[in-house]
C-alpha cells in the first residue's frame, strides 16, 4: 500500500526519492539523470542553498559550518515536501530532523571507493576538503557511514558504473517496491 507521505509515483518509483552519500558519489549527476528519466522535477539542495545564500564555500568561510547546517536544514525541509528527485548535500544527514524526515521516505545511498572518487573531486569547490584532500574525504565518510547505512533503502556502488546504469538500477529496484 502506498505510504500517505509518498504521494506520487513515476514509472513505479515513489516521489520524493532522495539521494544521499559522500562528496563526489554522484548525487547531483545521477539525481539529474534520474529526474529526466522519470519526467520528475529535480532538486539539488546544495544548488538551492547557493541560489538563495551565495556560494557554499563563502558561507563556510564567512559564517562557519554551524550556520551552514541551519540554512541547509531549512532548504532540505522544504525540498523534502516536493514530489521530486532530491539530491542532498553530503552532510545534510547530520541534522537529526532530516534523519527523522528520511526515515519515512525512499532513500538511495550512492557509494564510491576512494580510488574512484579521487579524480571526481579534483574540479570541485568543497570547503570541507580544503585541507587533507582524499584522507579527509575518507575520514568524513567513515564518521558518517553508520548514518548513511541506517537511512538507506537501497545502496548502489557508483565507482565503476556509468550514470545510465545507476539510474536503471534505481528505477529497477525502487519501481513498484514501496
Ligand atoms: N558514475 C559516475 N562515473 C563517473 N563519473 C561520475 C559518476 N557520477 C558522477 N561523476 C562525476 O563525478 C563528479 C562528482 O559528481 P557529483 O557532483 O554528481 O557528486 P555529488 O555526490 O553531487 O558531490 P557533492 O556532495 O560534492 O555535491 C562530477 O564531475 C561528475 O560528473
Ligand atoms: O559533505 C558535506 O558536509 C558537504 C557536502 C557538499 O554537498 C556541501 O553540502 C558542503 O560542501 C558540505
Ligand atoms: Mg552535488
Image: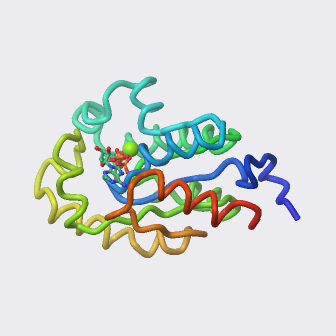
Residue 63, by quadrant, is top left
136 left or right of 142? left
Check the image and report above or below for 74 versus 129: above
User: Residue 5: x and y, percent?
Assistant: 79, 52
Q: How many marks?
A: 0
User: Residue 65: x and y, percent?
Assistant: 32, 46
User: Residue 136: x and y, percent?
Assistant: 18, 62
List the single residue furthest toward the right. 1
Q: Residue at x 56, y 69 (%)?
A: 154
User: Residue 86: x and y, percent?
Assistant: 56, 45
97 left or right of 119? right
Q: Residue at x 22, y 44 (%)?
A: 127
Check the image and report above or below for 48 versus 162: above
In which quadrant of this rendering is ligand 3 seen? Answer: top left
Residue 159, by quadrant, is bottom left
Residue 65 vs residue 99, the one in the foreground:
99
List the single residue furthest toward the left. 132
Residue 78 vs residue 40, the one in the foreground:
40
Q: Residue at x 71, y 60 (%)?
A: 175
Amino acid at each position: 500500500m502506498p505510504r500517505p507521505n509518498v504521494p506520487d509515483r513515476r514509472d513505479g518509483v515513489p516521489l520524493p526519492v532522495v539521494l544521499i552519500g559522500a562528496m563526489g558519489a554522484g548525487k547531483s549527476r545521477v539525481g539529474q539523470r534520474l529526474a529526466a528519466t522519470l519526467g520528475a522535477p529535480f532538486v539539488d539542495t546544495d544548488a538551492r542553498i547557493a541560489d538563495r545564500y551565495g556560494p557554499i564555500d563563502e558561507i563556510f568561510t564567512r559564517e562557519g559550518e554551524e550556520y551552514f547546517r541551519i540554512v541547509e536544514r531549512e532548504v532540505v525541509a522544504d525540498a523534502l515536501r516536493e514530489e521530486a528527485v532530491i539530491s542532498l548535500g553530503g552532510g545534510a544527514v547530520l541534522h537529526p530532523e532530516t534523519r527523522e524526515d528520511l526515515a519515512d521516505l525512499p532513500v538511495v545511498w550512492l557509494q564510491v571507493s576512494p580510488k574512484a572518487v579521487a579524480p571526481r573531486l579534483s574540479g570541485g569547490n568543497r570547503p570541507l576538503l580544503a585541507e587533507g584532500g582524499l584522507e579527509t574525504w575518507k575520514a568524513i565518510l567513515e564518521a558518517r557511514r553508520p548514518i548513511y547505512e541506517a537511512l538507506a533503502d537501497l545502496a548502489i556502488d557508483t565507482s565503476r558504473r556509468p550514470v545510465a546504469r545507476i539510474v536503471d538500477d534505481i528505477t529497477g529496484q525502487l519501481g513498484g517496491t514501496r
